[in-house]
Amino acid sequence: MIPRYSLPRMAAIWSEENRFQKMLDVEIFACEALAKLGKIPKASLFQIRKKARFNIDRIKEIEAVTNHDVIAFIKNVSEYVGEDAKYIHMGLTSSDVLDTALSVQMQEACDILIDDVKKLMRIIAGKARRYKKTLMIGRTHSVHAEPMTFGLKMALYYDEMSRNLERLKRARSAVSVGKISGAVGTYANIDPSVEAYVCKKLGLKPANVATQVVQRDHHAEFLVAIALTGTSLEKFATEFRNLQHTEIGEVEEFFSKGQKGSSAMPHKKNPIMCERISGLARILRANSIAAMEDIVLWHERDISHSSVERVILPDSTILLDYMLNKFMDVVSHLVVNEDRMLENLNRSGGIVFSGKLLLELIEKGLTRNEAYDKVQEVAFAARQGNIGLKEALLKDDGIRSLLSVQDIEKIFDYGYHIKNVDRIFKQVGI
């Protein structure tokens, strides 16, 4: 189900008005090309251009009888054009019009999504720069690993979104394909120059070869790119949800004045927008599977794909547009608790420096296995004894025989772990 909220520009692309207008554009451009070939009198082309229009209610009225949308559309346009309408749709099949028009709609939708991703990337980049050196604990298996920065986490998201941007650009190219080649793609009743002319006017590439339809792997690539982008948003949103755990409390969604979190528990602040994004990503992935199912058609065409596309293309583009804009709000107003990050970083009593300690002991002459076992022993003892790792090292005679107090102090340096942050940011391009 599409949320009640959807951005007007994207919704307008999938409106009946825009769909029929794109179909009319295809028909008129085809007439222009045929006129260049001498197949349509110039006077008739003039009348077609002047009079061609449609009425959606009338199309529906006709379709109720014909049970064929393109025939209903052509008949309605013909009612406006009159006698010269005999040249409209000459040599074409329905899918020439439908698929070519659909490609333009997908282009327009993709342009909005690309613009959305660029806007989100700018917002993420701003957060990355702001928290570039903000220390926090990195976690693997949900367990404290080594120190990092919140800015690095955001830089990672920026880099992933840059890949999604490239995927969407490639997907736009993939769907920018039209066909005006007739009932089984042989150009038997239409000259190939008509296809070339129409596609050029619409900013499309003619299909190298087609059946009655543009092949649906083009569309599947588009839906997969959308699903991947939505899944990235879910990944980011899930991390924010985890970091909003009461026991962690490092970030949280902005809670506006008057907002309520629970009907029963007035104290609640819930990551509802991130949860919504996570849920909607599931629909995008499901739709991408449906798009891949649409690739397989009987012989030169059946219409099993058509009903699916009328759902998944509007739904997926509108949903991702919605998700991207909502996630812009989430990131823009994200509450970042730097003090809690530092508190959590120190909570483990310094055992997060075990990796640096391991390397120091190897440099002092121990084998890796010897050093690893020794560090593990001291770290586990420190946790069990509820003391810091530094204190445990200073009390351990074996460690003290290898490391001086100064050596031990140097190990517990957060700067060591973030010394390459600037380099990483440069690699990412922030």
Image (spheres, rainbow, N blue to C red):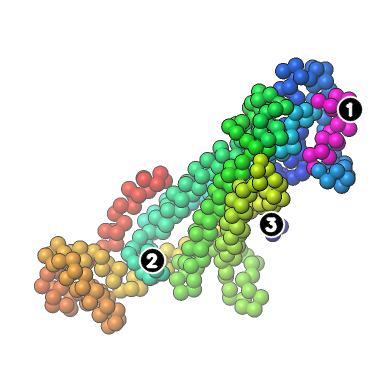
Distance of mark 2 from mark 1, alpha carbons?
Answer: 71 Å
Q: Sequence-wise, which precedes: disc 1 or disc 3?
A: 3
Q: Which residue is mark 2?
A: 139
For label 3, the SS is loop
* 200 sits to left or right of 52: left
Q: Rate crowding at label 1 as few (under 14), some (14 to 19) or many (20 or more) other CA atoms within 10 Å.
A: few
Q: Rate crowding at label 2 as few (under 14), some (14 to 19) or many (20 or more) other CA atoms within 10 Å.
A: few
Query: Residue 217 magenta-drawn?
Result: no
Q: In this figure, what is the number of numbered marks?
A: 3
* 178 sits to left or right of 42: left
State the residue in front, 276 or 311: 311
Q: Which residue is mark 1?
A: 82
Q: As displayed, is residue 302 above or below residue 142?
A: above
* 399 sits to left or right of 286: left
Residue 207: name its quadrant: top right
Distance of mark 1 from mark 3, alpha carbons?
Answer: 40 Å
Distance of mark 3 from mark 2, alpha carbons?
Answer: 35 Å
Can you give x and y, in whole percent of width and height, for residue 420 in the image?
30, 52
Q: Which residue is mark 3?
A: 2
Can you give x and y, in whole percent of width and height, for residue 211 in the image?
65, 37
Residue 198 in sight here: no
Which residue type carries mark 3?
A: Ile
Magenta region, residue range: 69-87
For label 1, the SS is loop
Residue at the image position 47 percent from the left and 46 percent from the top:
162
Q: Sequence-wise, which precedes: disc 2 or disc 1?
A: 1
| Residue depth check, mark 2 versus mark 1: number of the one nearer the observer | 1
| Residue depth check, mark 3 versus mark 2: number of the one nearer the observer | 3
Can you give x and y, in whole percent of width and height, for residue 173 in the image?
56, 37
Which residue type carries mark 2?
A: Arg
